[in-house]
Image: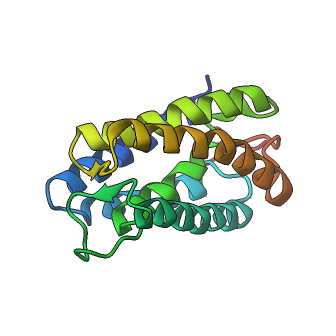
Amino acid sequence: MKRSDLINAAGFQAGWWLTILGAAHGLPWLGPLAVFPLIGLHLVYFSSRPRSELAFISLCTAAGFAIDSAIFAAGIAQATNPMVPGWPICPLWLLGLWFLFPATLSYSLGWLIGRPLLQVLFGAFGGATSYIAGVQLGALSFPSGWWAGALTYAIVWSFLLPALYALSGWLSPLSEPVLDGPNEAA
């Protein structure tokens, strides 16, 4: 694994933990506060096409907001400390994670490029597991039951992750070499 991929994975994990734990402890602004500088550093130091990647990240964030808002509105998941009580849409702290996640697709999750079956399996397992961890840590709940929430996210992510890779292939080619540092030439 390249150094840039390890840094990307570490940045995502740091952002994920800050976001989830902040949301669970009534600090929903903590994650987004960390996510935006992480994305900025990623775009400046690692992205070979920052504008295209930012457009891709923005589209993924909009899609994620719509998908999670539908799941929240259906009563399958809900934030334990919503910013607006009773408002059944994707909370802003989760939107921060949607902004961070697409930056992993061609870097720390680049091993999934061109492997649609693995994208389906990893999406189902990884997507559901991430939301389940959010429930276990207290940022989310599954009002309609643990199995309903886990199964919903497994199904959604089994389609969503391959769709994100397909979108990224259309918008910003993932096969392009990524710079390994700020001063290195490709």
Q: State whether residue 39 appears in this view.
A: no
Q: Which x, y percent locates residue 135?
A: 28, 43
Which residue is farthest top? 1
Q: What residue is rendered at 25% in x and 37% in y?
A: 136
Quadrant of the drawing holding the C terminus: top right
Q: Which x, y percent locates residue 167?
A: 77, 55
Report the front residue among 166 and 173.
Answer: 166
Which residue is farthest left? 25
Q: Is residue 69 left or right of residue 33?
A: right
Residue 79 versus residue 166 in the image, above or below:
below
Quadrant of the drawing holding the N terminus: top right
Report the front residue among 53 and 129.
Answer: 129
Where residue 56 sits, quadrant-wise, is bottom right
Residue 62 versus residue 157 in the image, above or below:
below
Q: What residue is rendered at 24% in x and 56% in y?
A: 23
Q: What residue is rendered at 59% in x and 50% in y?
A: 103
Q: State whether residue 171 appears in this view.
A: yes
Q: Is residue 24 left or right of residue 59?
A: left
